[in-house]
């Protein structure tokens, strides 16, 4: 439903912002849809919407919950390239992703 809301927002010319996209990524985490979560990150990037530490932490956590530790690592790298500062939540999400992928 969160992803549908993003679609409705664009239809009524209410542009989604970082907060609404982050909420959609978190919804993907709750439903175990890591691929959709990554698509939201891609749309944000293409739409020139700011990706912040919450964006990356939520996306890393989404991948981690689904055992996609390699994708989590890619997001952590992308975060550094984007010059977004990592925080404790980001590192915890990364560690959890590696653990679930049996890489820790």
Image: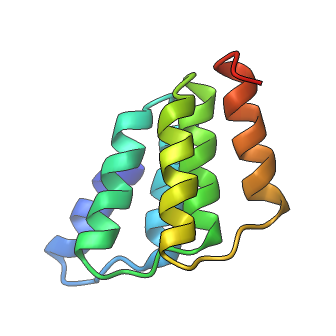
**Rendering coords of residue 8 (x, y %):** 23, 65
Residue 41 lies, with reference to residue 49, above or below; the image says above
Q: Is residue 23 in view?
A: no
Residue at far top of view: 102
**Residue in view at x 63 percent, y 66 percent:** 54
For the image, the number of numbered tags is 0
Residue 84 lies, with reference to residue 5, above or below; the image says below
Q: Quadrant of residue 83?
A: bottom right
Decide which of 16, 90 is in the foreground and name it. 90
Q: Could you tell me which quadrant the C terminus lies in? A: top right
Q: Quadrant of residue 96?
A: top right
Residue at far right of view: 88
**Rendering coords of residue 80 (x, y %):** 57, 68
Q: Please give left or right for residue 95 compared with residue 8 in the image.
A: right
Q: Please give left or right for residue 14 compared with residue 59 in the image.
A: left
**Residue in view at x 44 percent, y 81 percent:** 50
Q: Is residue 95 in view?
A: yes
**Rendering coords of residue 12 (x, y %):** 18, 78
Residue 57 lies, with reference to residue 28, above or below; the image says below
**Residue in view at x 33 percent, y 69 percent:** 44
Decide which of 89, 98 is in the foreground and name it. 98
**Rendering coords of residue 97 (x, y %):** 67, 32
Decide which of 12, 31 is in the foreground and name it. 31
**Residue in view at x 30 percent, y 82 percent:** 48
């Amino acid at each position: 439903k969160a992803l549908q809301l993003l679609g409705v927002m664009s239809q009524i010319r209410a542009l989604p912002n970082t907060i609404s996209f982050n909420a959609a990524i978190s919804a993907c985490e709750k439903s175990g849809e890591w691929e959709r979560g990554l698509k939201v990150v891609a749309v944000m990037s293409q739409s020139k919407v700011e990706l912040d530490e919450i964006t990356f932490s939520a996306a890393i956590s989404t991948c981690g919950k689904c055992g996609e530790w390699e994708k989590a690592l890619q997001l952590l790298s992308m975060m550094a390239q984007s010059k977004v500062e990592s925080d404790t939540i980001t590192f915890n999400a990364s560690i959890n992703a590696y653990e679930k992928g049996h890489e820790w």
